[in-house]
Image: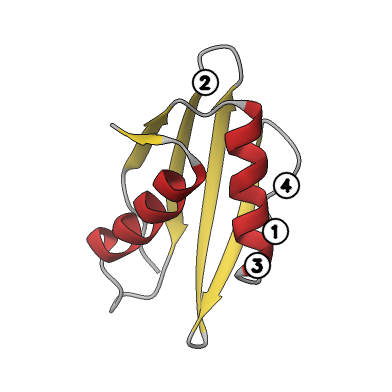
Amino acid sequence: MAACSTWTYRGITSSVFKSLQNVGRRQGFTIPNAASGKFTITVAGMSVGFQYAWDTNGQTLLLQCVNKPMLLGCGTIKSFADKIVTESGGKVV
């Protein structure tokens, strides 16, 4: 398993964070109801683990892929994350 660098997202208000949680639920994974935590996404039988830290005052979300299959690139994972954050109302930095 490998890991990726930390990605930063801005404009993550409480409503954007709730939207991220809802998108996760619809796609079969749970983002904890906490300012920091971990969650795992399973896609096509492959598990991808993340950790995050949300600064509620600064409205910034730090997201890092902490484990992934070697065949799945960080760029592909980031594109997936960027799409979900953007659709939820956040901004890619």
Residue at 66% over, 50% down:
21
Foreground residue among 45 and 84: 84
In the rendered view of the protein, which quadrant contains the N terminus? bottom left
Residue contact between numbered discs 2 and 1, judged by CB atoms under 8 Å: no
Which amino acid type is shown beneath numbered disc 4?
Answer: Pro
Residue contact between numbered discs 1 and 4, judged by CB atoms under 8 Å: yes
Measure the alpha-carbon separation of dots 2 and 4.
Answer: 17 Å
User: Which circle, 1 or 3, is nearer the viewer?
Assistant: 3
Which amino acid type is shown beneath numbered disc 3?
Answer: Arg
Which amino acid type is shown beneath numbered disc 1?
Answer: Thr
Helix, strand or loop for disc 1 = loop
Q: Label 1: how many residues lie within 10 Å, few (<14), some (14-19) or many (20+)?
A: some
Q: Which mark is residue 41?
A: none
Q: Which image quarter: residue 36?
A: top right
Q: Which mark is residue 26?
A: 3
Q: Which mark is residue 32?
A: 4
Q: Determine which residue is flagged by label 2.
A: 59
User: Is residue 33 rendered to the left or right of residue 45?
Assistant: right
Q: Determine which residue is flagged by label 1.
A: 30
